[in-house]
Image (tube, helix red, strand yellow):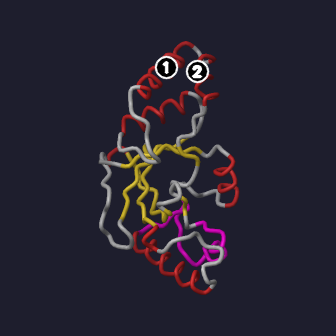
Amino acid sequence: MGNYIVVSNSGDYAKELLEQFPNYRGIDRFPWHLSKEDIAGICKLGKEKQAEAEKCLAKLMDMCIVDLCSEDFSYAYNYFRLSHILEIHADLLSCVIYDDKSAVVKEERTDTSRFEFLGYDYILSEAAYSCIIWEKRFVDQIENIPLNQNGLFNTFDEAKRFIDLREVAKKKYDGNGFEFGGPESYWIVAVYRYI
């Protein structure tokens, strides 16, 4: 079973985040971004693209509505395909969720041959998977933490080190300027992109 999410760099929140952190390729962008206007635009496509878009849309209509992450690769893939047909750049991500700071995997990912590893994200699980790496109060210290070309941690151990540094900083500032909750409210997530 996998956890799949389709994210786009469009939308005000994603644009603002990427203005500050242009390398970030994690989960906290614009999930499931297609609007009614985007769907209405299918009729303006050329005949071939319109047929392909309608095929994807029909498959999506036959499937259940998803939560933030879908366990159904087919749903996520058709959503991703439809985005690209409509010329909306999007990434199809697969997420492996780790339980707290341990290396115990809560959710497994399937079909590793079709995904490339981007890095480890650290997210607030209770707030639509908000990324904590770029937390405003902690950003000035980010240069002390190694991030890769995708704005994520290269290793699980680096993500754990970030958690420890964040907890020290949170105590230093009495929690002011930090997202709510303790480490139990957050997940380390290995992020993979469909290729």
Disc 2: CA contacts within 10 A as few (<14), some (14-19) or many (>=20)? many
Give the residue type at disc 1: Glu
Task: Name the image quarter holding residue 155.
Answer: bottom left
Badge 2 marks a residue whose secondary structure is: helix
- Above-or-below relation of 20 to 77: below
Side (left or right) of 178 relative to 154: right
Q: Earlier in the sequence, mark 2 or mark 1?
A: 2
Side (left or right) of 147 relative to 102: right
- In the image, 67 versus 149, the foreground residue is 67
x and y percentages locating residue 80 in the rendered image: 48, 36
| Residue matched to label 2 | 42
Task: Name the image quarter holding residue 136.
Answer: bottom right
Task: Name the image quarter holding residue 105.
Answer: bottom left
* Residue in view at x 60 percent, y 66 percent: 134
* Residue in view at x 30 percent, y 67 percent: 104
Question: Which residue is situated farthest in the top direction here?
Answer: 47
**Mark 2 touches mark 1? (CB < 8 Å):** yes
Give the residue type at disc 2: Ile
* Residue in view at x 50 percent, y 22 percent: 53
Span colored in magenta: 134-155
Badge 1 marks a residue whose secondary structure is: helix
| Residue matched to label 1 | 54
Which quadrant does the C terminus fall into? top left
* Residue in view at x 48 percent, y 76 percent: 163
